[in-house]
Amino acid sequence: MTSTDHSVELAKAGANVTGWWSRLVFLALRFPLGAFGAVIVALFVFAAIFADAITTVDPTSTNAAKSLAAPGPGVLMGADFMGRDMYSRVVHGARISLAVGVGSTVLGCLFGVIIGLASGYLLGWFDLLVQRVIDIMQALPLLVMALVMAASLGPSLQNTIIAISIPLIPNVARVIRSNTLAIRELPYVEAARAQGMSELRIAVRHVLPNTLAPLIVLGTAQLGAAILTEASLSFLGLGIPEPHPSWGRMLSESAAEYVRTAPWLVIFPGLAISLVVFGTNLLGDAMRDLLDPRQRS
Amino acid sequence: MTSTTAEIAATAPGERVIGDTVLAVEGLETVFYTRAGMVRAVDRVSFSLRAGETLAVVGESGCGKSMTALSIMRLIPDPPGRIVGGKVVLDGTDLLQLSEPEMRKMRGNRVSMIFQEPMTSLNPVLTVGRQISQALMMHQGMSRAAAMERAIEMLRLVKVPEPAQRVKEYPHQLSGGMRQRVMIAMALSCNPRVLVADEPTTALDVTIQAQILDLILELQKKLGTAVILITHDLAVVAETAQRVIVMYAGRKVEEATVEELFTHPRHPYTRGLMASIPRLGLMRSQAAQTGGRLQEIPGMVPPLFDLPEGCAYAPRCERADDHCRAEYPPYEEKRPAHWTACWHADD
């Protein structure tokens, strides 16, 4: 980390930039890589939302005449062996990836926050129990946990989201708990108590908001991991079932047979996965630099 | 000790309206269960407080001042601490008998507290206005809009410039003095009967200290609030309080009006405290005795889990004799309205 005190720099520069646009430009200049990541993520979100508007062909409609067509006019990224338009499938695949990425991240964070906050605020036997369960969960890698979950839940979009969100819970719970432990001892919590607030109110209104900054960082980083996990699960046949266009499944069904004869079937979904994960990681890193108080010191 | 307060009221400055007793603390006893053993942080402390009056509680670090304050608020962390005896009677209600939900209705409403650290006593992620209005919405059942109106009014009362603008700001946008003003506004927003100020000026610059103290006193006059001022700064006591309690090792060792205490300190500990602060004029005779040098009290407050048999101050006291070391002195009225616990107070 080259620079440390961004908040001060921001305040200094912020003294003469007022609007959100100029602030955005300042941040983009300050974190060029993060801005690049943000642009990739924004494009990806745009593609997911307006998938129907920017493609003309249904991603699931087959066309025998175009089977394994090479990229060219009309078939921008070629077509797979069933003649389904790859461009349309990749764009619609963004929708699946976004749904899984955001869905599982939000779900995982939600439960992680509740568990972490309760664990860190209540302490005692509850904390002890929760932390040991989390230890066990954290001993397994994300993909392995997701595999176990997906295999036991069965393949569907919903189950994939749930399967990926569960291994996320321990990470979030840990971060939130450690923050809660520090914040519950701060004078303003005592001051809130002296104002006559109930413990629940203090936990939710005063402790929780102060633990959330690292969660933004964690969430952004997890978004990429979740998308990658979905691709891996689908690649292994446990994620999103046919005929939904999932990048991972596109790779898995094409990789073995057509990688030599029709490499575009592998290149474009692979590129999409790499690009999105790269983008979210860049964004996550920039967020960490911007929000992590330890690096401000 | 109620008999003493009547006499003190008579000697209080004329402009101040001292009313009836609002808070009576009787035999308050708070213990902490630690690994080293049971610690008596507050040991049978009694005092009473009248409307509009300021009572100072002084003593070194670790003498039980803050624990007395937290006990009154019932904010002792339990475990490891516990209030094991006594009464804290506020307007006829014993706070120690209330259930926790009932006590919550008292905190911030009938009895408020200001803390030492204005820099960290405000929540960094909530606007100042939100923090002030919270108590109002909770205790007075005000709507959000009405509470915000009142928050602006309170900020104006504590002399924060541009209050309508300030309510929308976050604590980091305010200076330390401003934050302490906000804390005072928060504490007084529901017009409490008693305000407990735990070292409210310790963390502030000297110039700001004076402003904050003036503000507390001015508001006290305006609102008729009784104030318990906890401090280790005797200069602050002289300026603000009518009555002083000196605490040592969890016990009250001396109690008198401010004038009486400063002119005739009876307890050697009180004398030690006074000799250890630099002053102009007032105690010149004493300064002459010591060659114009400041005196320190040798040693430290003994660990509370290992108090000596007799007087807790005996190990540091130059007058201590075998009697002091063997038996704790009784707490007696040595002069009119001047109470102290020392075998040698009459010397």
Image: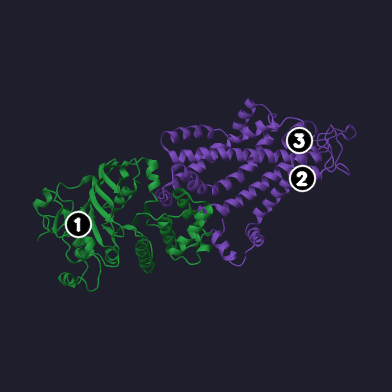
Which of the 4 quarters of the picture holds residue A54?
top right
Query: Left of B73 or right of it: where is A97?
Result: right
> Is disc 2 placed on a helix, strand or loop?
loop
Mark closer to the observer (2, 3): 2
Mark closer to the observer (1, 3): 1
Q: Are marks 1 and 3 in contact (CB under 8 Å)?
A: no
In three-dimensional space, the C-alpha distance between marks 1 and 3, rounded to whole angstroms, equals 86 Å
Mark closer to the observer (2, 1): 1
> Is disc 3 placed on a helix, strand or loop?
loop
Query: Left of B174 or right of it: where is B321?
Result: left
Residue A92 shows up from this direction: yes
Query: What color is chain B drawn in?
Result: green
Amino acid under disc 1:
Thr
> Is disc 1 placed on a helix, strand or loop?
helix
Q: Residues within 10 Å of mark 2 (few under 14, many from 20)?
A: some
Residue B298 shows up from this direction: no
Q: Which residue is mark 2?
A: A50
Residue A13 — which label?
none
- Residue at the spot 74% in from the left edge and 47% down from the top edge: A46
Q: Which residue is mark 3?
A: A245
Chain letter, colour purple: A
| B28 up-or-down from A131: above or below | below
Q: Nearer the viewer, residue B314 or A39?
A: B314
| A141 up-or-down from B76: above or below | above
- From the top left corner, tell me how far across and down residue B239 is, in percent: 29, 67
Q: Chain of mark 3?
A: A
Q: Which residue is mark 1?
A: B4
Q: Earlier in the sequence, mark 2 or mark 3?
A: 2
Q: Which residue ends up furthest to the right in the rendered image?
A: A65
Amino acid under disc 3:
Pro
